[in-house]
Amino acid sequence: MFGVGDKSGKLKKNNDKALFKHNYEGRTTIENAEQFFFPIYGLGDIKEKLYQVLIDSKQNNILLSGPSSSSKDMFLMKIHDQCNDVVYYDPALEKSPDLVDQISKNKNAKVIIIDNISKLRKSDWNTLPHLLKNGTIEKTAKTNKTEIKMDNIKIFAALDDQNRLGNDEPLSKLRALFVEYNISEYNDEEFIEFVKFYCRNKLPDEKSEIMARELIKYNSKVIKEVISFSKILRETDTREDIVRIIEDRMKHITS
Protein backbone atom coordinates (compact mmCIF):
# COMPACT_ATOMS: atom_id res chain seq x y z
CA MET A 1 0.00 0.00 0.00
CA PHE A 2 2.85 2.36 0.72
CA GLY A 3 5.87 2.90 -1.48
CA VAL A 4 8.61 5.32 -0.52
CA GLY A 5 12.13 5.29 -1.97
CA ASP A 6 14.99 5.19 0.53
CA LYS A 7 18.47 3.85 1.16
CA SER A 8 17.34 0.57 2.69
CA GLY A 9 18.95 -1.43 -0.12
CA LYS A 10 22.36 -0.48 1.35
CA LEU A 11 21.47 -1.77 4.80
CA LYS A 12 22.01 -5.27 6.12
CA LYS A 13 18.77 -7.25 6.17
CA ASN A 14 17.54 -8.66 9.48
CA ASN A 15 15.72 -11.96 9.86
CA ASP A 16 11.92 -11.96 9.84
CA LYS A 17 11.71 -12.35 13.63
CA ALA A 18 13.32 -8.97 14.25
CA LEU A 19 11.17 -5.86 14.54
CA PHE A 20 13.17 -3.94 11.96
CA LYS A 21 13.58 -5.34 8.45
CA HIS A 22 17.07 -3.86 8.24
CA ASN A 23 19.93 -3.37 10.64
CA TYR A 24 20.57 0.31 11.37
CA GLU A 25 24.19 0.80 12.30
CA GLY A 26 24.41 4.46 13.23
CA ARG A 27 26.51 5.15 16.30
CA THR A 28 23.79 7.06 18.14
CA THR A 29 20.02 6.87 18.52
CA ILE A 30 19.72 10.13 16.60
CA GLU A 31 21.74 8.75 13.68
CA ASN A 32 19.71 5.53 13.67
CA ALA A 33 16.46 7.52 13.77
CA GLU A 34 17.55 9.70 10.83
CA GLN A 35 18.41 6.61 8.82
CA PHE A 36 15.19 4.81 9.75
CA PHE A 37 12.97 7.76 8.82
CA PHE A 38 14.82 8.81 5.67
CA PRO A 39 13.74 10.80 3.59
CA ILE A 40 11.50 12.80 5.95
CA TYR A 41 12.78 16.37 6.00
CA GLY A 42 13.64 17.93 9.37
CA LEU A 43 11.72 17.04 12.56
CA GLY A 44 14.71 15.37 14.16
CA ASP A 45 13.12 15.49 17.63
CA ILE A 46 10.02 13.58 16.43
CA LYS A 47 12.17 11.04 14.59
CA GLU A 48 14.21 10.36 17.71
CA LYS A 49 11.14 10.02 19.96
CA LEU A 50 9.36 7.62 17.61
CA TYR A 51 12.51 5.55 17.11
CA GLN A 52 12.90 5.25 20.89
CA VAL A 53 9.28 4.09 21.11
CA LEU A 54 9.99 1.35 18.58
CA ILE A 55 13.03 0.02 20.43
CA ASP A 56 11.42 0.30 23.88
CA SER A 57 10.56 -3.02 25.51
CA LYS A 58 7.17 -1.78 26.76
CA GLN A 59 3.85 -1.17 25.02
CA ASN A 60 3.51 2.33 23.61
CA ASN A 61 0.52 4.15 22.08
CA ILE A 62 1.38 7.12 19.88
CA LEU A 63 -1.03 9.56 18.21
CA LEU A 64 0.31 11.75 15.41
CA SER A 65 -2.00 14.68 14.82
CA GLY A 66 -1.78 17.49 12.30
CA PRO A 67 -2.93 18.65 8.87
CA SER A 68 -2.43 16.74 5.64
CA SER A 69 0.39 19.14 4.78
CA SER A 70 2.41 17.82 7.72
CA SER A 71 4.61 14.75 7.46
CA LYS A 72 2.64 12.56 9.87
CA ASP A 73 1.55 10.20 7.08
CA MET A 74 5.16 9.71 6.03
CA PHE A 75 6.08 8.66 9.56
CA LEU A 76 3.41 5.96 9.34
CA MET A 77 4.65 4.95 5.88
CA LYS A 78 8.19 4.50 7.11
CA ILE A 79 7.13 2.47 10.15
CA HIS A 80 4.97 0.29 7.91
CA ASP A 81 7.74 -0.20 5.33
CA GLN A 82 10.64 -0.71 7.72
CA CYS A 83 9.08 -3.06 10.29
CA ASN A 84 8.05 -6.72 10.24
CA ASP A 85 4.63 -7.97 11.40
CA VAL A 86 2.66 -4.75 10.96
CA VAL A 87 -1.14 -4.52 10.97
CA TYR A 88 -2.43 -1.52 9.01
CA TYR A 89 -6.02 -0.56 9.78
CA ASP A 90 -8.01 2.22 8.14
CA PRO A 91 -11.61 2.38 9.46
CA ALA A 92 -12.51 4.67 6.55
CA LEU A 93 -12.13 1.77 4.10
CA GLU A 94 -15.62 0.28 4.00
CA LYS A 95 -14.72 -3.13 2.56
CA SER A 96 -11.79 -3.89 4.86
CA PRO A 97 -12.20 -6.18 7.90
CA ASP A 98 -12.62 -4.49 11.26
CA LEU A 99 -9.75 -4.14 13.70
CA VAL A 100 -10.43 -7.35 15.63
CA ASP A 101 -10.61 -9.42 12.45
CA GLN A 102 -7.35 -8.01 11.14
CA ILE A 103 -5.55 -8.62 14.44
CA SER A 104 -7.04 -12.12 14.71
CA LYS A 105 -5.30 -12.96 11.44
CA ASN A 106 -2.03 -11.40 12.68
CA LYS A 107 -1.80 -12.39 16.35
CA ASN A 108 1.99 -12.09 16.31
CA ALA A 109 1.92 -8.49 15.13
CA LYS A 110 4.54 -6.21 16.66
CA VAL A 111 3.11 -2.93 15.36
CA ILE A 112 -0.45 -1.72 14.73
CA ILE A 113 -1.06 1.36 12.58
CA ILE A 114 -4.49 2.99 12.73
CA ASP A 115 -5.08 5.62 10.06
CA ASN A 116 -8.01 8.07 10.13
CA ILE A 117 -8.78 7.38 13.78
CA SER A 118 -11.56 9.97 13.74
CA LYS A 119 -13.52 7.57 11.49
CA LEU A 120 -13.55 4.63 13.92
CA ARG A 121 -16.33 2.10 13.40
CA LYS A 122 -18.88 1.16 16.04
CA SER A 123 -17.25 -2.25 16.35
CA ASP A 124 -14.01 -0.58 17.47
CA TRP A 125 -15.36 1.38 20.43
CA ASN A 126 -15.37 -1.54 22.87
CA THR A 127 -12.20 -3.03 21.44
CA LEU A 128 -9.66 -0.25 21.15
CA PRO A 129 -9.61 1.07 24.76
CA HIS A 130 -8.67 -2.38 26.14
CA LEU A 131 -6.02 -2.77 23.46
CA LEU A 132 -4.53 0.62 24.33
CA LYS A 133 -4.60 -0.01 28.09
CA ASN A 134 -3.13 -3.49 28.31
CA GLY A 135 -2.76 -5.02 24.85
CA THR A 136 -5.84 -7.23 25.14
CA ILE A 137 -8.76 -7.77 22.81
CA GLU A 138 -12.08 -9.37 23.68
CA LYS A 139 -15.01 -9.65 21.30
CA THR A 140 -18.14 -11.79 21.43
CA ALA A 141 -20.17 -12.31 18.28
CA LYS A 142 -23.11 -14.72 18.60
CA THR A 143 -21.51 -17.92 19.93
CA ASN A 144 -17.93 -16.98 19.02
CA LYS A 145 -15.64 -15.26 21.50
CA THR A 146 -12.29 -13.78 20.54
CA GLU A 147 -9.60 -13.24 23.17
CA ILE A 148 -6.12 -12.02 22.26
CA LYS A 149 -3.23 -10.77 24.42
CA MET A 150 -0.50 -8.81 22.66
CA ASP A 151 2.70 -8.18 24.60
CA ASN A 152 4.75 -5.01 24.13
CA ILE A 153 2.67 -3.94 21.13
CA LYS A 154 3.44 -0.58 19.50
CA ILE A 155 0.31 1.28 18.37
CA PHE A 156 0.56 4.30 16.08
CA ALA A 157 -2.51 6.30 15.05
CA ALA A 158 -3.02 9.34 12.83
CA LEU A 159 -5.54 12.13 13.11
CA ASP A 160 -6.27 14.86 10.55
CA ASP A 161 -9.26 16.54 12.13
CA GLN A 162 -8.08 17.90 15.48
CA ASN A 163 -11.18 19.99 16.08
CA ARG A 164 -13.50 17.02 15.76
CA LEU A 165 -11.46 14.99 18.21
CA GLY A 166 -11.42 17.82 20.70
CA ASN A 167 -15.21 18.26 20.55
CA ASP A 168 -16.16 14.58 20.51
CA GLU A 169 -16.24 13.20 24.06
CA PRO A 170 -15.71 9.49 23.22
CA LEU A 171 -12.77 10.34 20.99
CA SER A 172 -11.38 12.73 23.58
CA LYS A 173 -11.37 9.89 26.13
CA LEU A 174 -9.60 7.69 23.62
CA ARG A 175 -7.07 10.45 23.00
CA ALA A 176 -6.09 10.34 26.68
CA LEU A 177 -4.78 6.79 26.18
CA PHE A 178 -2.17 7.98 23.68
CA VAL A 179 0.99 10.00 23.91
CA GLU A 180 0.27 12.66 21.32
CA TYR A 181 2.68 14.46 19.04
CA ASN A 182 1.23 17.32 17.05
CA ILE A 183 3.12 17.88 13.81
CA SER A 184 2.64 21.31 12.29
CA GLU A 185 2.38 21.83 8.56
CA TYR A 186 5.44 22.94 6.66
CA ASN A 187 5.48 26.63 5.84
CA ASP A 188 6.07 27.45 2.16
CA GLU A 189 9.85 27.58 2.34
CA GLU A 190 10.04 24.40 4.45
CA PHE A 191 7.72 22.68 1.99
CA ILE A 192 9.99 23.63 -0.91
CA GLU A 193 13.00 22.24 0.96
CA PHE A 194 11.06 19.07 1.79
CA VAL A 195 10.19 18.49 -1.88
CA LYS A 196 13.81 19.04 -2.91
CA PHE A 197 15.00 16.65 -0.23
CA TYR A 198 12.42 13.98 -1.03
CA CYS A 199 13.04 14.13 -4.81
CA ARG A 200 16.78 14.66 -4.64
CA ASN A 201 17.66 11.30 -6.20
CA LYS A 202 15.23 11.75 -9.07
CA LEU A 203 14.86 15.42 -9.99
CA PRO A 204 17.23 18.39 -10.07
CA ASP A 205 16.55 20.91 -7.31
CA GLU A 206 15.25 23.53 -9.72
CA LYS A 207 12.59 21.15 -11.06
CA SER A 208 11.63 19.97 -7.59
CA GLU A 209 11.18 23.61 -6.66
CA ILE A 210 8.89 24.16 -9.66
CA MET A 211 6.75 21.24 -8.47
CA ALA A 212 6.66 22.60 -4.93
CA ARG A 213 5.71 26.12 -5.98
CA GLU A 214 2.95 24.81 -8.26
CA LEU A 215 1.47 22.78 -5.40
CA ILE A 216 1.66 25.82 -3.15
CA LYS A 217 -0.15 27.83 -5.83
CA TYR A 218 -3.00 25.32 -5.78
CA ASN A 219 -3.03 25.29 -1.95
CA SER A 220 -2.09 21.61 -2.10
CA LYS A 221 0.91 21.19 0.20
CA VAL A 222 -0.08 17.56 0.66
CA ILE A 223 2.68 15.03 1.24
CA LYS A 224 0.83 12.29 -0.63
CA GLU A 225 0.69 14.57 -3.69
CA VAL A 226 4.45 15.02 -3.56
CA ILE A 227 4.92 11.25 -3.43
CA SER A 228 2.52 10.81 -6.35
CA PHE A 229 4.12 13.48 -8.56
CA SER A 230 7.60 12.19 -7.75
CA LYS A 231 6.60 8.98 -9.54
CA ILE A 232 5.19 10.84 -12.56
CA LEU A 233 7.68 13.61 -13.24
CA ARG A 234 10.94 12.91 -15.06
CA GLU A 235 14.31 14.56 -15.04
CA THR A 236 13.86 15.49 -18.71
CA ASP A 237 10.56 17.31 -18.10
CA THR A 238 10.65 21.04 -18.81
CA ARG A 239 9.12 23.73 -16.63
CA GLU A 240 6.16 23.80 -19.02
CA ASP A 241 5.76 20.01 -18.70
CA ILE A 242 5.72 20.16 -14.89
CA VAL A 243 3.24 23.04 -14.81
CA ARG A 244 0.95 21.28 -17.28
CA ILE A 245 1.05 17.91 -15.50
CA ILE A 246 0.23 19.46 -12.14
CA GLU A 247 -2.45 21.72 -13.63
CA ASP A 248 -4.16 18.75 -15.31
CA ARG A 249 -4.09 16.76 -12.06
CA MET A 250 -5.50 19.62 -10.01
CA LYS A 251 -8.32 20.20 -12.47
CA HIS A 252 -9.25 16.53 -12.19
CA ILE A 253 -9.17 16.63 -8.37
CA THR A 254 -11.35 19.75 -8.09
CA SER A 255 -13.81 18.87 -10.86
Image: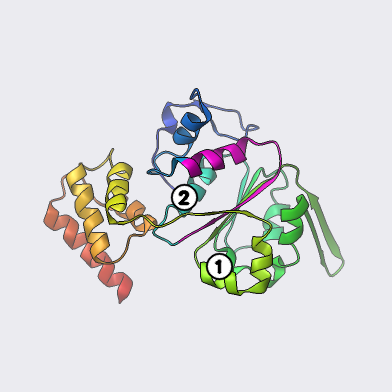
In magenta, the rendered stretch is 45-66
Quick check: is 53 in the magenta stretch? yes
Q: Earlier in the sequence, mark 1 or mark 2?
A: 2
x and y percent of residue 193 in the render? 28, 46
Tell me the residue at 59%/37% (across/down): 52
Q: In this view, which residue lies farthest toward the right?
A: 143
Quick check: is 130 in the magenta stretch? no
x and y percent of residue 62 in the render? 61, 51
x and y percent of residue 188 in the render? 28, 56
Q: Amino acid at mark 2?
A: Phe
Can residue 98 be seen at all in this image of the molecule?
no
Quadrant in the rendering for residue 197: top left
Residue density around tag 2, few if under 14, some if 14–19, many if 20 or more, within 10 Å = few
> Is 91 left or right of 6, judged from the image as shown?
right
Quadrant in the rendering for residue 129: bottom right
Rendered view: 110 above or below 162: above
Q: How is the image coloured?
A: rainbow
> Is 235 left or right of 169, judged from the image as shown?
left
Can residue 45 be seen at all in this image of the molecule?
yes
Quadrant in the rendering for residue 118: bottom right
x and y percent of residue 64 in the render? 54, 55
Say which residue label 2 marks: 2
Q: Are marks 1 and 2 in contact (CB under 8 Å)?
A: no
Q: Quadrant of the C terminus?
A: bottom left
Tell me the residue at 26%/61% (across/down): 216
> Is 196 left or right of 87, judged from the image as shown?
left
Q: Amino acid at mark 1?
A: Ala
Say which residue label 1 marks: 92
Q: Which mark is residue 143?
A: none
